[in-house]
Amino acid sequence: MTRAPEPTETTDRSITVVLLDTDRERRDCQSYEEAIAVVKEELAPGTVAKIENRDGEIVFTSSEMSIDAWEVEWRQQKRRLSVETEDHVCPYDNVGCIFDDLCVQCKMDAVQDSF
């Protein structure tokens, strides 16, 4: 039987899950993985869940996005931060164009350059 992996990200201050239904409940978590698990477990119709980072900023609100979609995005961003990538400057000034996720124009240029 395999043990569950330890959280890869811990902080001195807590990540807080705020549950809003009839009252306001705050739960401190030691990692984003733990906070995501709490939201998935506690989210019910009529409840709004928020994840607050250690600086007090709200980084997730269930009324704006599903926790599953946010988790996927969070894991992608975490992976991007952990991987050394080369700098990519989009010649079309597309701010969403990055090394591992090129814009359409840069993809077309890459295909044309490969021939």
Image: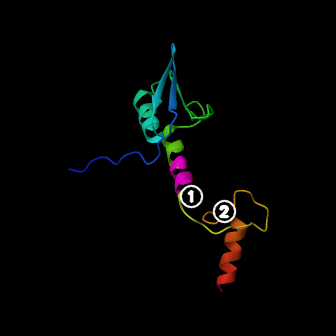
Q: Which residue is mark 1?
A: 80
Farthest-out residue, bottom: 115
Farthest-out residue, front: 12
- State which region is magenta: 73-80
State the residue at coordinates (61%, 31%).
56
Under tag 1, what secondary structure?
Answer: helix
The answer to whether residue 39 is left or right of residue 1 is: right
| 75 to 44, vertically: above or below | below
Under tag 2, what secondary structure?
Answer: loop
* Amino acid at circle 2: Ile
Identify the image quadrant of residue 108: bottom right
State the residue at coordinates (44%, 41%).
33
Identify the image quadrant of residue 89: bottom right
Residue 78 image position (x, y, % from top left): 53, 52
* Amino acid at circle 1: Arg
Residue 106 is covered by the magenta coloring: no
Residue 59 image position (x, y, % from top left): 60, 37
State the residue at coordinates (46%, 35%).
35
The answer to whether residue 59 is left or right of residue 8 is: right
Residue 79 is covered by the magenta coloring: yes
Could you tell which of marks 1 and 2 lies nearer the N-terminus? 1
Q: Which residue is mark 2?
A: 98
Residue 115 image position (x, y, % from top left): 66, 86
Tag 1–tag 2 contact (CB < 8 Å): yes
Q: Residues within 10 Å of mark 2 (few under 14, many from 20)?
A: some
Observer-nearest residue: 105 or 24?
A: 24
